[in-house]
Image (spheres, helix red, strand yellow):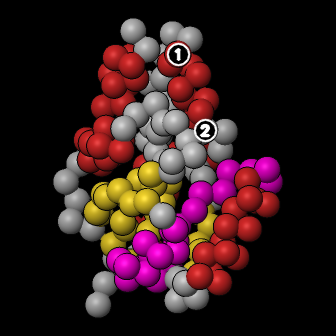
Amino acid sequence: MKRTALYPGSFDPITNGHIDIIERGLELFDRVVVGVGINMEKSPLLSADERMQMIRESIGERPDVEITSYDGLTAKFAEQIGAIAILRGLRAISDFEHEFQMALANHKLFPKAETVFLMPSLCNVYLNSSMVKTIARLGGDVTPFVPPPVVGRLAEKFK
């Protein structure tokens, strides 16, 4: 039986930091399911299909990575896919309180999955999707922050 981890997020857009967490998650688990969350309370720049396509283009075909979208509770989705862990990146102290609360709630809803926090690689500590979108919107170069397939897609969005 494969040890599956769920890596949930909005990935709007996927960044090099997200790719780093996926790669490092694969060192710990046999399979990582990248779950593109659909949150009706947010207005993403990119559709769920666009986000999933960019992830596929960024990581290539990998039998140990599944990319899908979901809505509703992350814990419920983790249970549906048979995950034993929920992967979360933890960049700074400012992330901790929110992530800790989510981890406790997810554990209460689905105790069979542990939340596993991964610290980002040093080069990605400051990186987040909101910052990338702001740089792109203002005409800046996002190539140091995102995989190549994302660069063109953001340029199209902010013409």
Q: Where residue 112 sits in the image (x, y, percent)?
A: 52, 89
Q: Which residue is mark 1?
A: 137
Q: Using the image, determine if residue 127 lies above or below residue 26.
A: above
Q: Residues within 10 Å of mark 1 (few under 14, many from 20)?
A: some
Q: Nearer the viewer, mark 1 or mark 2?
A: 1
Q: Say which label, 1 or 2, has the lower sequence index.
A: 2
Q: Residues within 10 Å of mark 2 (few under 14, many from 20)?
A: some
Q: Where residue 111 sits in the image (x, y, percent)?
A: 58, 88
Q: Using the image, determine if residue 152 lies above or below residue 8.
A: above
Q: Which mark is residue 127?
A: 2
Q: Where residue 101 sits in the image (x, y, percent)?
A: 74, 68
Please report the residue visible at 66 percent of the width from the left and 57 percent of the height from the top. Answer: 90
Please report the residue visible at 44 percent of the width from the left and 24 percent of the height from the top. Answer: 143
Which image quarter is the N terminus in?
Answer: bottom left
Which image quarter is the C terminus in?
Answer: top left
CA distance separating discs 1 and 2? 16 Å
Q: Secondary structure at mark 2?
A: loop
Q: Secondary structure at mark 1?
A: helix
The answer to whether residue 131 is seen in the rendering is yes
At label 2, the amino acid type is Leu
At label 1, the amino acid type is Arg
Pick whichever, 77 or 91, lies toward us.
77
User: Does residue 84 belong to the magenta stretch?
Assistant: yes
Pick whichever, 26 or 108, lies toward us.
108
Pick whichever, 112 or 2, lies toward us.
112
The answer to whether residue 23 is seen in the rendering is no
Disc 1 vs disc 2: Cβ atoms closer than 8 Å?
Answer: no
**Residue range highlighted in magenta:** 73-94
